[in-house]
Image (tube, grey):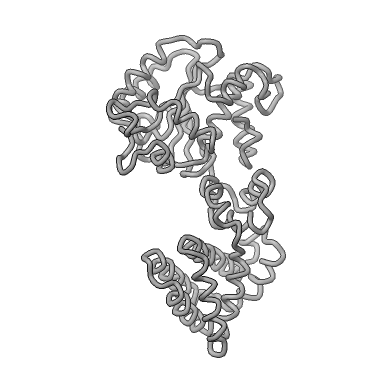
Amino acid sequence: MLFSAIPAHTDLKRVLTQAARRGHVAHAQLFRGAEGSAALALALAYATFLNCEGRAEADEDSCGTCASCLKTSKLAHPDLNFIFPVTTTKAVSKDATSQKFAAEWRAFLLENPYQGFNDWMQFIGAENRQGSIAKDEAGALLKLVSLKAFEAKFKIAIVWLPELMHPAAANAVLKLLEEPPGATVFLLVSHAPEQLLPTILSRVQPVVVRPLREDELTAYLRDAQHLPEAKARQVAQLAEGNIGAALDSREKSADHDYFAFFREWMRLCFGFHTKAAEILKQSEEFQKLGRENQKELLSYALGLLRKVLLYGLDPALVPHLPAAEQDFIHRFSRFITLRNADQLTQELNDAHYHVERNANPRMVFVDTSLRVGGLLKI
């Protein structure tokens, strides 16, 4: 993984590379970011950079072509180690440890480094079992640091989701952080750092990984994933900065223009007294979307409604709008105020709730349309 493959985070990448070039590499660092963020990808890119053999002194990224980079890109470097939550499965019926899932982990991570814990559990066939970093990992960690690096400058251990460590494993990590071995770097990647032992938090250097802005995620989906601009923006709005969610939903959303649907829907709601037949016709289109896309459309509508309200308060609060969206939001913002915004939000949330629980989608759509139409007149 190279830094250049990860969208945005320019300032954070610069901080990490400058620290490495100056030799100021903390022995334990905590990459903290929400699920679906670039935290794991950045930790992996940082590990690649630390052991890159081909980069020049002023380079801002790994060379990508030296032996170390090539091995790391395949997650096959002998000095790159992973600890991650696992559980028993049909393939591993007892004593589940990270080492026994090494092949699955490589396939999972190479497929998409922005996936979350539930994605991993499904990938290994955990069914309803809960994963954790078992106490047996403590021995593996101690063995790991007792050995010198095989061929790289640093021996690196990436611990994914350390908040799921068994207390015995957590205590082993704490001991290692208190008495760090030479030339060993621990990169902890956490979605919930508040669940870690305070003593662990006090011994790691924090690396805060923020969610992507909508425009950054749009650019990534457009340029790197080759989605059309309108679709990329639609998916980015739904993902709310979550790269993993955006990549997961790009195919599901690709055939639907939620913005055009919402714009027409609001036009019909506003004139619902005389447009009942058109509302019924659009309810048929809503039904054809299928339940998952119906829920996604309602989630999109909630996000767009929030933009409209913010724009009405101050247009500067909603930057980076495309021309078509900006024109609609500008005109529609006259009808979304602090007096009706909460009620409109509640109606869309209620519609989402009923669709999720298998209510008749046409009935939900028509009922919500009439209620929204009444609120737009307030």
Relative to 368, does residue 118 appear above or below in the rendering?
above
Position of residue 193 measured from the top left corner of the image (x, y, whole percent): 40, 38
State whether residue 352 appears in this view.
Answer: yes
Which residue is painted at 63% across and 41% down in the image?
Answer: 7
Q: Where is residue 366 in the image (x, y as percent from the top left)?
A: 47, 79
- The quadrant where residue 146 appears: top left
Q: In which quarter of the image is the N terminus?
A: top right
Q: Describe residue 281's horizontal placement relative to residue 347 as left or right.
A: right
Instruction: Give the total number of marks visible in the rendering.
Output: 0
Query: In terms of image quadrants, where is residue 137?
Result: top left
Q: Is residue 281 above or below residue 135?
A: below
Instruction: Specify whether 198 is left or right of 22.
Output: left
The residue lying furthest to the bottom in this view is 274
Return the residue nearer the eye: 267 or 227: 227
Q: Nearer the viewer, residue 91 or 306?
A: 91
Q: Position of residue 295 (x, y in %)?
A: 47, 63
- Residue at the spot 52% in from the left edge and 43% down from the top edge: 37
Give percent across and percent down for residue 109: 50, 33
Q: Residue at x 44, y 72 (%)?
A: 361
- Quarter occupied by residue 74: top right
Choose between 220 and 126: the one closer to the eye: 126
Relative side of 153 to 137, left or right? right
Viewer-nearest residue: 44 or 275: 275
Residue 197 seen from this side: no
Q: Is residue 20 above or below residue 13?
A: above
